[in-house]
Image: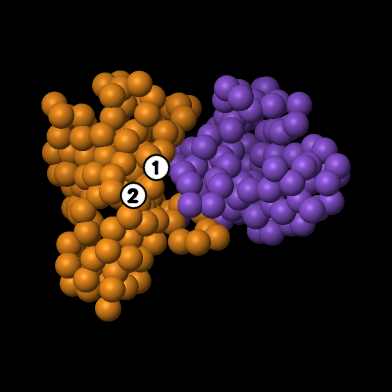
Amino acid sequence: QQQVKQSPQSLIVQKGGISIINCAYENTAFDYFPWYQQFPGKGPALLIAIRPDVSEKKEGRFTISFNKSAKQFSLHIMDSQPGDSATYFCAASIGGYGGATNKLIFGTGTLLAVQP
Amino acid sequence: GAVVSQHPSRVICKSGTSVKIECRSLDFQATTMFWYRQFPKQSLMLMATSNEGSKATYEQGVEKDKFLINHASLTLSTLTVTSAHPEDSSFYICSALRESGYTFGSGTRLTVV
């Protein structure tokens, strides 16, 4: 129940295209769903996060779509650029947004390559 | 914004020795910090949760006597890999929790030779 399943494992997108990465979870107690971007040899950096009381959140070219009933959430990267080439991780936690102490569970990661 | 500094970024040590990795929250106080381990092309696996002033909580399968965690202040947590072996070679990443979410350090590449 603590798992977060992520797909696809890898993704190739043309410059200017839309990158879509999907995640699914089982534990309905999760209430914080962030997406992280990681470059080789670096720690993950927060891209965008959502709570289950909203169905969509957009920040610049990045959008999270959240489907509470299906227990799924996805990251959409609009107008994908070569600089977006990185590994993307979804994650989930209970109370991670608001000062609680629960741990963050990561998805398996998606290696995105944006071709020029 | 919130910054977490991790040091060193890279370390090579001989088999059988110990190595300490530091994780500092530079502009905020972190009651809770987390330590992760990441193998090449894999996800981040939580090793332990570090709480200031108390013992760390280790995930199942993580040897607490091998991976010593100390969180002596609200801005510093350390991970010591004791009696390191080549199989301990990995990328270690810390994270600190604040009200706005989790902030990650830049990671430490440990190579045991």
> What's the distance in space between the residues labelled 2 and 1, CA to CA?
8 Å
For the point 13% across and 26% down, the residue is A69
For residue B102, what is the image quadrant? top left
Q: What's the image's color scheme?
A: by chain
Secondary-structure class at tag 1: loop
Q: Which chain is orange?
A: A
Q: What amino acid type should be assigned to the residue bearing mark 1? A: Thr
Q: Which chain is purple?
A: B
Q: Is residue B40 above or below residue A51?
A: below
What number is the disc on residue A96?
none
Identify residue for label 1.
Answer: A108
For the point 24% across and 44% down, the residue is A22
Q: Is residue A85 above or below residue B27?
A: below
For the point 28% across and 45% down, the residue is A7
Q: What amino acid type should be assigned to the residue bearing mark 2? A: Gln
Tag 2 near tag 1, CB within 8 Å = yes
The image position of residue B24, as x and y in percent, is 63, 47
Q: Residues within 10 Å of mark 2 (few under 14, many from 20)?
A: few
The answer to whether residue B32 is seen in the rendering is yes
Secondary-structure class at tag 2: loop
Identify residue for label 2.
Answer: A9
